[in-house]
Amino acid sequence: MQLRYNYRAYPDAPQRRALASAFGCARVVWNDCLRDRKEAHAAGLPYVKSAELSRLRITQAKHTQERAWLADVSAVVLQQSLRDLDTAYKNFFDSVKGKRQGRKVSPPRYKSKKDTRQSIRLNTNAFSLQDDGTVYVAKVGDLRVKWSRRLPAAPTSLTVTKDSCGRYFLSFVVDTEPDILPDVETDAGIDLGLSAFAVLSDGRKIDSPRFLRRAEKKLKRLQRELSRKVKGSKNRAKARIKVARQHAKVADRRRDFHHKASTQIIRDSQAVYVEDLAVSGLGRTRLAKSVHDAGWSAFVGMLEYKAIKHGRTFAKVDRTFPSSQVCSACGFRDGPKPLHVRQWTCGACGTMHDRDHNAARNVMFEGRRIVAAGRAETLNACGAPIRRAHVPAQRVEAGSLRKGQTTQAGIPGL
C-alpha cells in the first residue's frame, strides 16, 4: 500500500526563486497542452496524444524565443506536469463513462499563478535524500527539511508544494506493507454530530473542538484589515498572508485532531462502522459553517484508509438508514424526531434513549449486518479477506508511528 508523508521545508532565497520558476514552467506546460486538446476538440479533430504534446510543448518549445526559459528547470518537472494532465483527463473520461465511482469529475481547468496552491511533482531521477538530512531537488539545490519522523521506506516520488501563506512542504510517497494491529474484541459504531463531534456505541463522546468558531474573532479583525487595503498594494499582500496564515492554523489544528481521534478509534476497535452523511447537502443549509468546521468527510476518509492499513474492518451505513428512529433495544421504529429532541422513550419497550448513543448503536448493528452480507471492502471480524480495496496515498499526512515501534528504514544521518 502507498502512504504519503509530509514534511516542512525551509528553502533560502535563491531556492525560493528556483522553485517559483519551476512552479511557473509546470503551469505553462499544463496550460499549453490543455489548450491544444481543447482546440482540437472544438475543431472536431482527434484527441491529441501525449507524445505529440511532449514533442511540441516541451522539446521544441525550449528552442523558441517565447519558451526558451523552460530549459531553466528540470525536464522531469515538465514531463510530470503532462502526465498529471493525462491523469486528470483519464479521471474525467472514466467518470463520464461510469467507470469511476463517487461524484462526477469535472474536466481539467487552466491553472493560474494566483491559485492558493502551487506544486511540482518529481520522480526518483530528480531528487535524492542526502546524508546530512537535506533533500536534493534537481536545479533547485539541497533543501533544508524539518524531519518530524523517519520514513518507513525509500520514497518513490516527491511533491514540492507552496501553500497560500508561503509555507513549503515536501510530500513523499512510500510503498509499505500493511501494519496489522493485534486483534481486539470490540466493535464501534460512530454517530457524527455537531454538539458532540462523535458518539460511539459504547457511550464515549468526543467533544467538538470547533476550531473555526474559536478563531472567528481574530479572523474577522484580519478580514476587516484586508478589506481596507488598496487593491494591488504591498500592504494588501501582507494582510492577505496574515489571513491565510490564520486559516492555515485552523486547518492544521483540525487535521491534527482528526488524526489523533481516528487513530485512537482504530486501535481500540476491531471493526468500525460509520454513517455515510450527505456533507455536500448539509453544507448548503443554515448549519453550513458548523458542518464544514467539523470536517466529517476528512475524518471518515482517515478512518477508512487507517482501517485498511491496520487490518481492521470498516463499513459505511447508508444515509437513508433510520438510525435515530429505531430503538436499539427492541428494534421498534418510533418515527422521525426533530433535532431538538435529544432523549426519547421507546413506545414499545419503554427504554429511555439518548438520541446520539442510540443512533451509534443502530449504526453498529447495521454495519455488522453489512459485513455479514459480504459487502464491506476491508477484512471482516474473523480476519478473512472479503474484498481488498486499493489504498492510494492520501494527500494529508499519513499518521504517526505507534509508541515503541522501530523501523530500519529512514533518513540517512538522522
Image (cartoon, grey):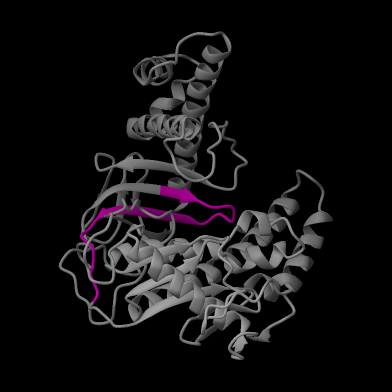
46 left or right of 229? left
Q: Is residue 290 visible?
A: yes
Q: Is residue 228 inside the magenta stretch?
A: no
Q: Which quadrant: the C terminus?
A: bottom left
Placement of 290 over or under 163, stated as above or below? below
Where is residue 156 drawn, in percent x and y? 25, 48
Which percent across, then down, holds residue 17? 48, 43
Determine the residue positioned at 77% across, 63% down.
286
Q: Nearer the viewer, residue 358 or 378?
A: 358
| Residue furthest left as drawn | 408
Q: Would you say 327 lies left or right of 373 here?
A: right
Q: Is residue 319 left or right of residue 288?
A: left
Place residue 112 in its image quadrant: top right
Q: What's the magenta region?
A: 160-181
Q: Is residue 177 magenta?
A: yes
Tell me if residue 3 comes above or below residue 322 in the rendering: above
Q: Position of residue 252 (x, y in %)?
A: 53, 67
Observer-nearest of 368 and 340: 368
**Image height check: is 216 above or below 385?**
below
Q: Residue at 38% x, 54% y: name it.
A: 171
Point out residue 184 in the picture as x, y percentages from the top left corner: 28, 81
